[in-house]
Amino acid sequence: AQSVTQLDSQVPVFEEAPVELRCNYSSSVSVYLFWYVQYPNQGLQLLLKYLSGSTLVKGINGFEAEFNKSQTSFHLRKPSVHISDTAEYFCAVINTGGFKTIFGAGTRLFVKA
Amino acid sequence: DTGVSQNPRHKITKRGQNVTFRCDPISEHNRLYWYRQTLGQGPEFLTYFQNEAQLEKSRLLSDRFSAERPKGSFSTLEIQRTEQGDSAMYLCASSLGQARETQYFGPGTRLLVL
């Protein structure tokens, strides 16, 4: 069985500051890792995903994430946030041979002017 | 490609009534998922279809819940004898046929049981 822990439920940050949203996972088998974003009153959309290869993954809107197998982490980063990045961010894992996706509880990023 | 659509977007019902939600996936996607999301939580897996076959059903899904995907196209999720605890956002997602594929989510159906 897999589990996902997002260590911060809310992250307030000023515009143009860097941000890191933390995600740790637990799994006894190989997994794929995803970050999804949910803007207010919209459906979830993919930011980025790690499948294999380079541990640094770049996504849309200037976000990137680094897969760390030894620490079982997949933290999301952005060097300079905008007001428009205010949203809920979800980390998710799926067994490489499976279909059941496990989501974390989410981190609400609030960007202040 | 019009994306994943869900209907209705909002549903208010009285306890004990039956409700049915519909999901229309992206046309070439053979995987279809249903999730439930409550306030302050991430989506929780409910069930999964590969084409028309329902391959997995979460323990979260009591016998009052049933899902179908006739002909491997649209899907319906029915809740019988609704309870106040069923109040949540019900999300549908679709993807191509492998775990590595991105899931595309619909806007959700928000259910309120009075």
Image: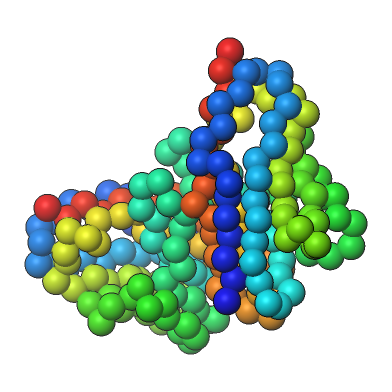
Q: Residue at x 73, y 60 (%)?
A: A72
Please state which of residues B40 and B31 is positioned toward the viewer in this rendering: B40
Q: Quadrant of residue B86?
A: bottom left
- Image position of B65 with respect to A58: above or below: below
Image coordinates of residue A37 in percent, x first then y, are 58, 44
Please state which of residues B89 and B49 is positioned toward the viewer in this rendering: B89
Please state which of residues B37 and B90 is positioned toward the viewer in this rendering: B37
Residue B31 visible (yes or no): no
Residue B9 visible (yes or no): yes
Query: In the drawing, does residue B96 fall left or right of residue B7?
Result: right
Q: Residue at x 61, y 23 (%)?
A: A13
Image coordinates of residue A19 in percent, x first then y, are 69, 31
Image coordinates of residue B67 in percent, x first then y, are 35, 77
Query: In the drawing, does residue B33 fall left or right of residue B7?
Result: right
Location of the N terminus of chain A by quadrant is: bottom right
Q: Residue furthest front?
A: A71
Q: Quadrant of residue B64?
A: bottom left
Location of the C terminus of chain A by quadrant is: top right
Image coordinates of residue B9 in percent, x first then y, are 32, 50
- Image position of B17 with respect to A85: above or below: below
Q: Residue at x 65, y 56 (%)?
A: A24
Q: Residue at x 24, y 70 (%)?
A: B79
- Image position of B62 with respect to B4: above or below: below
Query: In the drawing, does residue A58 fall left or right of residue B58?
Result: right
Q: Residue furthest top?
A: A113
